[in-house]
Image (cartoon, helix red, strand yellow):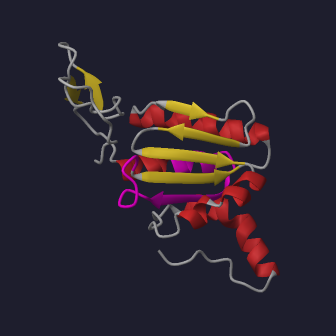
């Protein structure tokens, strides 16, 4: 697991970052690893993608940006058609990661306007866009060097329906580029 790099004050202990879903405070206030069936960041990203797809998100993609960035391991990108759907997708992702992986978001941005909601889970950052914002910022292209995480068929089928139909209408197969 990669950790965020942060500075530290002179004479202080190195900052290990906020507790992720894998760590908790011990009785002495220090960090200790949770025992049990903890999910790796890859699995947390898949779980986030599945949650987004369950709320009818389109174009769900998970990118392994860990070798390109020091701040996180995975980006999950999803598109909702309206501000209401963007909020619903973000809420479902947050709820599912908390319930099934014990991971809480340490940051949440853009909820008020709901054109681009960002959920920061330390090892996984989830971006939920409206179509105009996703097209404008083009994170898919910006991070095109990042390998795509293979997602379950029900996620790619649910999120690829619109893209596949558009690709077929234009004479293409609607396939994703190879990873």
Residue 39 appears in which quarter of the rendering? top left
Q: Residue at x 67, y 56 (%)?
A: 137
- Expressed as whole percent of the image width and height from the top left, the position of residue 96 reads 51, 36
- Expressed as whole percent of the image width and height from the top left, the position of residue 108 reads 57, 32
Residue 67 part of the magenta segment:
yes
Picture mark count: 0
- Return the residue nearer the eye: 28 or 42: 28
Q: Residue at x 41, y 39 (%)?
A: 122
Q: Residue at x 62, y 77 (%)?
A: 175
- Tell me if residue 102 comes above or below residue 147 in the rendering: above
Q: Residue at x 54, y 38 (%)?
A: 119
- Return the residue nearer the eye: 178 or 158: 178
- Tell me if residue 36 comes above or below residue 53 in the rendering: above
Q: Which residues are magenta?
A: 48-72
Residue 112 appears in which quarter of the rendering? top right
Most distant residue in the top direction: 27
Residue 142 part of the magenta segment:
no
Most distant residue in the front direction: 10
- Expressed as whole percent of the image width and height from the top left, the position of residue 159 reads 65, 60
Most distant residue in the bottom direction: 171
Give the side of residue 14 with respect to residue 178, left or right: left
- Return the residue nearer the eye: 85 or 4: 4
- Tell me if residue 93 comes above or below residue 141 in the rendering: above
- Expressed as whole percent of the image width and height from the top left, the position of residue 124 reads 44, 46
Residue 134 appears in which quarter of the rendering? bottom right
- Return the residue nearer the eye: 24 or 8: 8
């Amino acid at each position: 697991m990669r950790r965020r790099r942060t500075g530290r004050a002179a004479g202080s202990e190195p900052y290990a970052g906020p507790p992720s879903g894998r760590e908790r405070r011990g009785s002495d206030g220090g960090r200790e690893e949770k025992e049990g069936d903890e999910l790796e960041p890859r699995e947390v990203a898949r779980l986030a993608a599945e949650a987004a797809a369950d709320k009818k998100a389109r174009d769900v993609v998970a990118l392994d940006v860990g070798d390109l960035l020091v701040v996180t391991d995975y980006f999950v990108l999803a598109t909702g058609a309206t501000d209401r759907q963007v909020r619903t997708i973000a809420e479902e992702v947050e709820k599912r990661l908390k319930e099934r992986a014990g991971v809480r978001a340490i940051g949440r941005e853009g909820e008020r306007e709901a054109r681009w909601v960002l959920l920061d889970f330390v090892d996984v950052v989830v971006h939920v866009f409206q179509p105009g914002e996703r097209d404008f910022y083009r994170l898919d292209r910006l991070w095109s060097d990042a390998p795509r995480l293979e997602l379950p068929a029900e996620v790619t089928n649910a999120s690829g329906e619109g893209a596949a139909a558009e690709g077929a209408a234009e004479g293409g197969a609607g396939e994703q580029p190879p990873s």
